[in-house]
Image: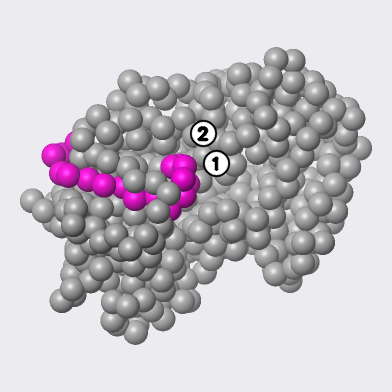
Amino acid sequence: MAHYDAIVVGAGHNGLTCGCYLARSGLCVLVVEGRAAIGGMTSTEELVLPGFRTDVHASGYQLANLSSATGELALEDFGLELIRPEVSLSKVFPDNRCLNIRATLEKTQASIAKFSRRDAETWGSLYAGYLAGKDLLRHELESPPLPSGAILTGLENDPGGQDRIRLRYQSVRSWAGETFDSAAMRDLMADFAGHAGFAPDDAGGAVFALLFLSVIQDAGNRVVKGGMGSLPAALAACLTRHGGEIRAGTPVTRILVEKGTATGVELADGAILRAGCVVSSVHPRHLILHLLQDAGLDRTVIEDIAHYEIGASQLGIYLALSAPVTYLAGTEAAAATQVHLTPPTTDGLAEAFRAIRAERLPDEPSLFVVNEATLDPGRVPAGRSALKIILTTVPFAIDWHTERIRYAQAVIDRITRHHIPDLGRKIIGMTVMSPVDYEADLASALHGTVTHGAMTLYQQGAMRPTLRLGQYRGPVGGLYLCGAGSHPGPGVSMMPGRNAALVILEDRK
């Protein structure tokens, strides 16, 4: 029977990150992955046609720009290469004017000034505030989360803290409405909140919009050269360099618990692997309700996780193209990492969310286009191109067997009519992933989600995934959580994996 200091369940980027830190500290580490390929939601595959490599889930290297892991693990030495675009993001309106977030603050302000000079100045002030607090923000993201009460007490005693408390709870409609003059900036901010699952009037959406736009302005909506799958490949190389192992292709079916302590795992092939501790990067629901179903957990732990909200499902449309396409919005949109073609108004986005929450497909969905091949031509054959269209929020409980292709084609037709007139005739291959398809492909994509749980106010920080599991420690001794279901949450950041590793090392002295 093999024995390890630590077994990490799941070889997504957070599981691999955690494994790297543990192995680098001298522990004997094994990362176990149920799928044949590592990466989880940071994977790149030939999903449409041979030679066309596309990112299946995550695309942009955004919050990871704040992560210490990139440098601490020396990922560039293991093949990670990042491409920073001149235009990180382009918000396109019905008249095909666009608002662009560019590589320098001055260029972004020039784009905003076409809609409102005052808004351009306001964005400069907001961004200056982000830079001033950047080190503190990084510390908060890369530390075990404080209880909500402690956070509020600290803010109450801090100059300007009252405004920050208000911002934490504001909806994006409320905050953007009192901050910006132009509908364009208000609508752009609503887009960003929507990408995190917040409808325009949901409490807590404002701070997410401000955070992500600031991060993108700071370091760019960068692209991983060769595809997002190059990130887990670099992490795997780092792990093995420090003596860690990866075993892929055999799922973990049970976490072994003896006398209230995790002692190892059982694999689908019947193998028993022992460990000094077990670390889970899988969805918190899967961990508690399946991998620990025989562990005799306290009923409150099971009830808490049964109430854990799953979050918004998504739909992906992956296109192989005979040649690059032309945006009516111009070359800036074509050069951007992402192009927002969401409903042009905040009211329109709110209506889309209302339809989805009533389990109806919206007539005008929230979507963005990723220009993968424009920024990284090596992903496709010479002279060809590719696009990825992501609908960030769609209903789960509909008949996707009949609606998947019909609805995807309606989305493509709409984009062709209004924004990319040559799109339809240049499509040479298409793959559509509905929420049902995402779930079938990856166990952690429960209901076709990519967040390991909704980022509602009551599922953030020390309450993520639940109060009893909010500090990376599991419901039994020797068990830890290191996935996106822990602070600071979803997105490519490596922070949950890094944070959990530091907690484990502290516990082991």
For the point 32% across and 78% down, the residue is 294
Where's the N terminus, which quadrant?
Answer: bottom left
Q: Which mark is residue 137?
A: none
Report crowding for label 2: few under 14, some 14 to 19, many 20 or more residues within 10 A (C-alpha): many
Q: Which mark is residue 228?
A: 2
Q: Is residue 313 left or right of residue 321?
A: left
| Boundaries of the magenta span | 24-40
* Callout 2–callout 1 Cβ contact below 8 Å: yes
For the point 34% across and 54% down, the residue is 9
On the image, the x and y values in percent for residue 237 come to 33, 30
Circle 1 residue: 58
On the image, the x and y values in percent for residue 401 come to 77, 61
Q: Does residue 27 belong to the magenta stretch?
A: yes
On the image, the x and y values in percent for residue 164 come to 43, 52
- The answer to which image quadrant residue 85 occupies is top right
Chief secondary structure of the magenta span? loop
Viewer-proximal residue among 220 and 188: 220
Q: Amino acid at mark 2?
A: Met
Q: Does residue 243 belong to the magenta stretch?
A: no
